[in-house]
Amino acid sequence: MRLRKVLPAVLPAMALAAIILLPAVSGAQNFGSVSLNTGFMPDPQMLAGTSGGGMSASAMGGDCRGWITPQPDHYMFLNTPFGWLRVFIRSGGDTTLIIRGPLPSMMTQCNDDRFGLNPAIEGYWAPGQYHIWIGSYSSGSMYPYQIGFTEISSVQ
């Protein structure tokens, strides 16, 4: 009897948690990964992909913008702490950047237009696996991009 009263209240919360957590624990990635230690060479490390998707980035929380795929575009494995690291996008289109940190913190950082129409996120990074999405600001748009990882502040 009690379960009938509790279950309707708990199911919506469980469904919302599944929606929020699903992209972060997905096993697949779209375009590849990078594994970094402090002092990595060459600097910057670069990967490529295509931005956009059918899911609103606002589902990731915060002020995330744009359109992404449910699964991450890239994984970033940090084997050491970074006192400062920049993750940046180079693209001819209007792109957005979303990075979700390692469990259990599940921190999500978002950026749009840090360098013109290109996003970047920088600062201190703890070791762990990060999930990265590159969105297109406008629905239905897809742009080729390069994603870079650098410890050099003049690189963007």
Image: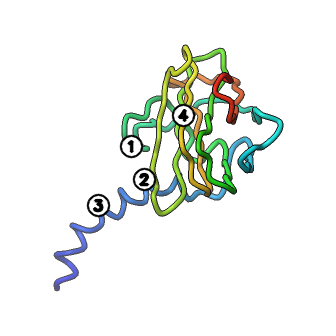
Q: Residue at x 46, y 37 (%)?
A: 57
Structural crowding at the residue carrying mark 3, measured as other residues with C-alpha within 10 Å and reported as few (<14), some (14–19) or many (≥20): few
Query: Which dot, 2 or 3, sits closer to the camera?
Result: 2
Of residue 94 and residue 140, the one placed in the foreground of this image is: 94
Query: Which dot, 2 or 1, sits closer to the camera?
Result: 1
Q: Which mark is residue 129?
A: none
Residue 155, position as x, y percentages in the image: 68, 24
- Label 2 and label 3: CA atoms lie apart by 12 Å
Q: Which mark is residue 20?
A: 2
Count up the numbered dots. Answer: 4
Of residue 3 and residue 36, the one placed in the foreground of this image is: 36
**SS class of the residue under badge 2?**
helix
Question: Which residue matches tag 1?
Answer: 61
- Label 2 and label 1: CA atoms lie apart by 8 Å
Residue 2, position as x, y percentages in the image: 17, 83
Structural crowding at the residue carrying mark 2, measured as other residues with C-alpha within 10 Å and reported as few (<14), some (14–19) or many (≥20): some
Q: Residue at x 66, y 48 (%)?
A: 76
Q: Residue at x 62, y 29 (%)?
A: 88
Q: Earlier in the sequence, mark 2 or mark 3?
A: 3
**SS class of the residue under badge 1?**
loop
Figure check: 59 above or below 92: below
User: Which amino acid does the dot numbered 2 rest on?
Assistant: Ile
Q: Earlier in the sequence, mark 2 or mark 1?
A: 2
Query: Which dot, 4 or 2, sits closer to the camera?
Result: 4
User: Which amino acid does the dot numbered 4 rest on?
Assistant: Ile
Query: Which dot, 1 or 4, sits closer to the camera?
Result: 4
Q: Residue furthest bottom?
A: 1
Q: Earlier in the sequence, mark 4 or mark 2?
A: 2
Question: Which residue matches tag 4?
Answer: 121
Q: Residue at x 78, y 43 (%)?
A: 40
Q: Earlier in the sequence, mark 3 or mark 4?
A: 3
Question: Which residue matches tag 3?
Answer: 12
